[in-house]
Image (cartoon, rainbow, N blue to C red):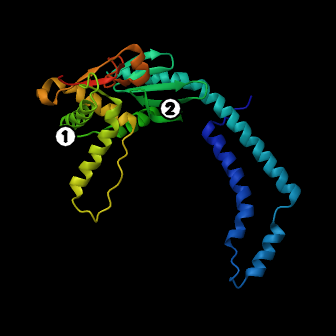
């Protein structure tokens, strides 16, 4: 019986890598031969003499290619098989460390303000806020990678926070602007402003803030990138501070009918895993 230890995945890849680099090295010497070199022809002739012959190089490439294919197939199968246990261990980590989480179904769970969706069939996951994608589908091989993606998602949210000293005033201005427009058009229930219509106006407000900060019109002002998830995140932050706001800055979120929710609703209530998502259609002020 052989006492030789089995080659692990890392060692196997390093052996394969050496085979591939050996092929590249044999052919890649041409990069070091310069036409202005005094020994140009001598070096080129030597290169031609040592250049791998057609059948020899064909056999080496085919053999190495077969090893590469076998390695990829084996590694994929192994990682797909290990993926469910990685997710289980991550959930155990959340529980053992007192993290806020909730399992929605077998392939979906919420962690704090984030939702993680998984595809065990190809060992990938993505991260969302209020059902809007923050981190696209990406392969995961260990718990540390999940933690890294979660940190990246939280950092993205944080980067789009509108300061709390600005946010209520901004929403009040946007609401009053939209309501005045609806009043002029004599729309019924003009005090109900479509939440989706606030997104574009919020981008305009953010751009206006940039202009006010710069005050130098010779300075280039970058465009405002404010995706749907950033808009919904700041709406949820505003909702969290409603009870502390004065009446003139306090607006309420209305759900609308089922048909309206499907057509014009936005998903909110995403700041805590312990809360259920809820669709809202309108922002309401006093009539």
Left or right, 79 with respect to 223, comes to right
Label 2 crowd bin: few (<14), some (14–19), many (20+), radius 10 Å? some
Up-down relation of residue 162 to residue 94 (above or below): below
Q: Position of residue 124 (x, y in %)?
A: 54, 30
The percent coordinates of residue 103 (x first, y second) are 42, 16
Q: Residue at x 84, y 50 (%)?
A: 59
Neighbour class for label 1 at 10 Å: few (<14), some, many (≥20)?
A: few
Element type at mark 1: loop
Residue 166 tag number: 1
229 horizontally vs 164: left or right? right
142 and 116: which is toward the camera: 116
Quadrant of residue 27 in the image? bottom right
Residue 213 visible from this viewpoint: yes
Looking at the figure, which quarter contains the N terminus?
top right
Q: Is residue 42 left or right of residue 236?
A: right
Residue identified by numbered label 2 = 142
Secondary structure under tag 2 reads loop
Percent across and percent down for residue 223 are 36, 51
Residue most extreme to the bottom: 38
């Amino acid at each position: 019986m052989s006492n030789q230890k089995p080659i692990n995945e890392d060692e196997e890849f390093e052996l394969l890598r050496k085979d591939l680099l050996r092929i590249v090295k044999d052919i890649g010497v041409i990069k070091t031969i310069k036409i202005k070199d005094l020994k140009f022809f001598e070096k080129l002739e030597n290169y031609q003499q040592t250049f791998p012959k057609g059948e020899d190089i064909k056999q080496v490439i085919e053999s190495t290619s077969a090893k590469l294919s076998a390695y990829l197939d084996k590694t994929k199968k192994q990682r797909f098989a290990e993926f469910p246990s990685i997710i289980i261990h991550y959930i155990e980590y959340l529980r053992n460390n007192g993290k806020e989480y909730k399992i929605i179904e077998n392939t979906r769970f919420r962690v704090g303000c984030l939702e993680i969706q998984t595809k065990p069939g190809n060992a990938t996951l993505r991260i969302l806020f209020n059902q809007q994608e923050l981190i696209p589908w990406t392969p995961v091989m260990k718990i540390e990678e999940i933690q890294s993606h979660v940190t990246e998602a939280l950092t993205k949210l944080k980067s789009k926070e509108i300061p709390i000293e600005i946010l209520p005033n901004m929403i009040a201005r946007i609401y009053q602007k939209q309501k005045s427009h609806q009043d002029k058009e004599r729309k019924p229930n003009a005090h109900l402003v479509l939440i989706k219509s606030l997104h574009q106006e919020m981008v305009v407000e953010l751009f206006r803030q940039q202009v006010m900060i710069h005050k130098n019109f010779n300075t280039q002002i970058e465009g405002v990138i404010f995706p749907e998830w950033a808009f919904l995140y700041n709406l949820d932050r505003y909702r969290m501070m409603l009870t502390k706001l004065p009446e003139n800055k306090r607006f309420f979120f209305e759900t609308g009918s089922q048909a309206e929710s499907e057509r014009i609703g936005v998903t909110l209530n995403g700041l805590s895993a312990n809360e259920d998502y809820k669709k809202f259609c309108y922002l309401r002020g006093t009539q």
